[in-house]
Each structure stands twice: as C-alpha cells, then as structure tokens.
C-alpha cells in the first residue's frame, strides 16, 4: 500500500514536501507549509491514455510535462511546483527515486527558470566550479578527487544554476551524495563494500558525502568540460565565446526539452549572461591513466588566477 506520509527536504535550492521518502536528501529547515515543490502519488494511467501518444516517452501539454518510463512510472511535472507519480506494476522504489532526482528534477528546474547543467560542482575559495561532459567523461570522479583533497561538493549529476541577488549566476546545492563507478572507487582507494549499489547498476555506487557537502549557494566562477582522449598526456585550455555557446547548450541537462518547452530564447539569454561571468575550459584527460589528482592541482591553480575571481 502506498504511504500518504509526507517528509520535507532541502535540495536544489528548494524545500520539497514529498509522499515518497528520499533517504539521500537532507531534512528541510522549514515546514511543509513553506514547500516550493510537492511530490505526491496519483493515478495517471487514464490521463496518459487520453494524451494519445502511446509510443512517446514524454508529452507536453497545458497541464505540464508528462513522462512514461517503461517499468517505472508515469510522471507529471506541473509549473515547477507539483510532481505527481503513478508507479507502474512491479516498479522498484529505487528506480522511481532515480528518475525523480534526475529527469523530473531537471524539468522542475527548467519550469522554475533555473538552468540545469549535466555534471558535478565543487567549491574552491568561495566560488563554484562546474565539471560538465558526456556520460562517462569522469565528472563525478574528478569531483571525488576534489573532495579527497579537502574541498566541498555542491552537486553531482544535475547542476542547478540560478540568478543571484546581484545578477550573478550561482550554483545551489543539491544533496550530499555522489554516484561513482567501481573503477573510480578503486582509483580513490575506497571500499565498494561500504556503499549501496544503485538500482540495476551493480558496479555504480551511492556514496554519501555529508561531511564534505556545502549547503549554501555559491557564485559560479568557472566551467570545465571533460573530454576523453587516447593521448597519454592531459591538457586544459580556455575556450572562447563562440565555442562556449554550443558547449553549454549541449551540456544542458535534458536539453531536448528546451525546444519542446519553447525555451530557446530564454536558454540563449541565460547562457549568454552566464558566459559574461564565468570562464570556460576544455579538459582533455587520458583514458589510459588516472589523471584526477593532477587535474585537481591545475584547476585549483587556474581558480586562483585573477581572471577567475
């Protein structure tokens, strides 16, 4: 039987009141009455059937964005304020949570006028530095190397960027957990037996990082795109504006929604403003050697340069 109890959490700069428990999220500092986002169970089977798109994974209407994930659930995301979840038969709760904190949360952020980037972010000397890239590029591993060096995590997987009170882009904290592959744990000398594997991904693990988590918004100062290379050596080079616009478009989380939600103009304006405040670099890392500790040293050096302050 589905629970009707609600718990309040803080994540992505939002207070979330949810009927679905999220053990990976931090408890909210305010009550349910002040929730920015409500997550609740609902029966959406009839609604999805009426949409008349049985072969689609998502549909956008005046009622919001609907997703139907085979074997998981039907989700409705409405006005960035409400999410309804209709689990499918035999759906695993872990899988539902993964989609809620990933695709669904990315949709919520877009509806609320926040830019979601695909990557991880850490804090260096009071500034947020984001690592973006395609799946498997090493974003979480590099962030883990920063944590190992004494820095704090802001977010892993989805980077929520909003406009601060002074007009500067800032990254809001997500929740104190990383997702790391077995290979990354091995490189970091971390014992996989101490962590829970993610659903259906027995070699990828949920790693709590509460003691190394930064729980306040931080101005975004730099963005590093990670690209894998067959070269033995690694390199970091700055990119110019013409290169940065398509890069940030490509690494916007669930970028297929931008056109579908008629956000092309807004998206262009947001990333243009962002590029006026943050420097962008491309990091080429070798697939043959573990370069994360060396990249940490070089990125910290770049962060200390005057133009990144």
Image: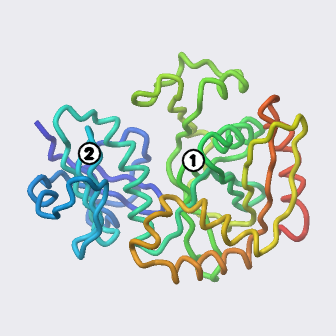
Locate residue 163, reporting x and y percent: 57, 76
Locate residue 194, reporting x and y percent: 54, 19
Q: Residues within 10 Å of mark 2 (few under 14, many from 20)?
A: many
Seen in the image, is 165 located left or right of residue 54?
right
Nearest-to-viewer mark from 1 and 2: 1
- Front residue of this view, candidates 100 and 28: 100
Marks 1/2: CA–CA distance? 21 Å
Residue at image point 53% right, 23% down: 203
Secondary structure found at label 1: strand
User: Which label sits on residue 18?
Assistant: none
Residue at image point 55% right, 48% down: 157
Q: Is residue 104 above or below residue 190?
A: below
Quarter assignment of residue 70: top left
Locate residue 188, reporting x and y percent: 71, 26
Which residue is identified by label 1?
156
Which of the two labelled residues, at mark 1 and mark 2, occupies the earlier sequence position?
2
- Front residue of this view, candidates 54 and 66: 54
- Front residue of this view, candidates 232 and 215: 232
Locate residue 226, reporting x and y percent: 73, 49
Q: Is residue 188 above or below residue 270?
A: above
Secondary structure found at label 2: loop
Residue at image point 43% right, 40% down: 24
Which residue is identified by label 2?
20
């Amino acid at each position: 039987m589905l629970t009707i109890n609600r718990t309040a959490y803080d994540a992505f700069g939002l207070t979330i009141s949810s009927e679905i428990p999220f053990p990976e999220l931090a408890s909210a500092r305010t009550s349910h009455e002040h929730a920015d986002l409500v997550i609740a169970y609902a029966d959406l089977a009839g609604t999805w059937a009426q949409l008349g798109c049985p072969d689609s994974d998502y549909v956008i209407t005046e009622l919001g964005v609907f997703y139907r994930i085979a074997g998981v659930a039907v989700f409705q995301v409405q006005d960035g304020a409400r999410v309804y979840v209709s689990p499918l038969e035999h759906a695993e709760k872990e899988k539902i949570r993964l989609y809620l904190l990933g695709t669904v949360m990315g949709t919520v952020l877009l509806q609320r006028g926040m830019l979601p980037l695909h990557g991880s972010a850490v804090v260096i000397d009071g500034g947020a530095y984001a690592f973006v890239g395609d799946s498997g590029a090493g974003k979480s591993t590099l962030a883990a190397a920063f944590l190992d060096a004494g820095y704090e995590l802001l977010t892993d997987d989805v980077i929520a960027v909003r406009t601060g009170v002074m007009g500067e882009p800032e990254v809001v904290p997500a929740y104190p957990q990383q997702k790391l592959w077995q290979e990354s744990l091995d490189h970091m000398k971390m014992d996989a037996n101490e962590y829970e594997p993610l659903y259906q991904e027995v070699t990828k693990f949920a790693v709590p990082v509460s003691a190394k988590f930064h729980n306040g918004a931080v101005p975004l100062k730099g963005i590093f795109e990670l690209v894998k290379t067959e070269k033995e050596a690694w390199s970091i080079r700055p990119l110019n504006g013409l290169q940065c616009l398509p890069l940030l478009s490509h690494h916007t989380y669930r970028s297929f929604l931008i056109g579908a939600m008629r956000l092309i103009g807004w998206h262009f304006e947001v990333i243009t403003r962002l590029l006026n405040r943050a420097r962008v670099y491309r990091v080429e890392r070798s697939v043959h050697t573990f370069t994360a500790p060396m990249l940490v040293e070089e990125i910290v050096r770049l962060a200390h340069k005057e133009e990144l302050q």
